[in-house]
Amino acid sequence: MKTVAPDGREKARGGDRGVATVWVAVSTATLCTVFALVLALGQAVAARHRAGGAADLAALAAADRALDGAEAACGAARRVAMAQNAVLVRCAVHGEITDVVARSSFGPYEPAVRARAGPPAATHGAMGSAGET
């Protein structure tokens, strides 16, 4: 917008015309970037939780069949992991204690989670601490 000087000549207003547009564009780009990062972090956390749940359930299924032998226990763990849309990466049976690793994919993320299961006394004494690590 131009203003008219007392002598009749037009003069331009300050040199900051359009600065608000630049600030809005930069702010919008920054907010979109932060939003994308938060969504990616949420997707990574969800993938980790899916894999953890599949590993826990597979370890419990394997522990339930541990006395039938390693092949039967790992077969049960594999079926449970597949039912959770996960892949059984590793399965080991040591007496009544089972140790499994399951991987689940969610978006670009594919975390693998380890879980152990067995009787409380055997788990603490033979393997250290019970549960997922």
Image (cartoon, rainbow, N blue to C red):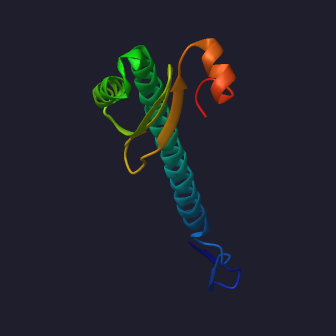
Quarter of the rendering containing residue 57: top left
**Foreground of the two, 104 or 66:** 66
In the picture, which quadrant includes the C terminus?
A: top right
In the image, residue 36 above or below residue 43: below
Left or right of 75 in this view: 124:
right
Left or right of 47 in this view: 86:
left
Position of residue 80 measured from the top left corner of the image (x, y, whole percent): 32, 24
In the image, residue 34 above or below residue 79: below
In the image, residue 43 above or below residue 5: above
Quick one: which residue is furthest to the right in this view?
Answer: 6
In the picture, which quadrant includes the N terminus?
A: bottom right
Position of residue 132 measured from the top left corner of the image (x, y, whole percent): 58, 29
Residue displayed at 52% across by 30% down: 115
Quarter of the rendering containing residue 14: bottom right
Residue displayed at 68% across by 80% down: 5
Left or right of 62 in this view: 72:
left
**Foreground of the two, 33 or 101:** 101
In the image, residue 31 above or below residue 14: above
Position of residue 22 measured from the top left corner of the image (x, y, whole percent): 57, 67
Position of residue 46 measured from the top left corner of the image (x, y, whole percent): 47, 35
What count of labels does the image hold?
0
Residue displayed at 33% across by 27% down: 84
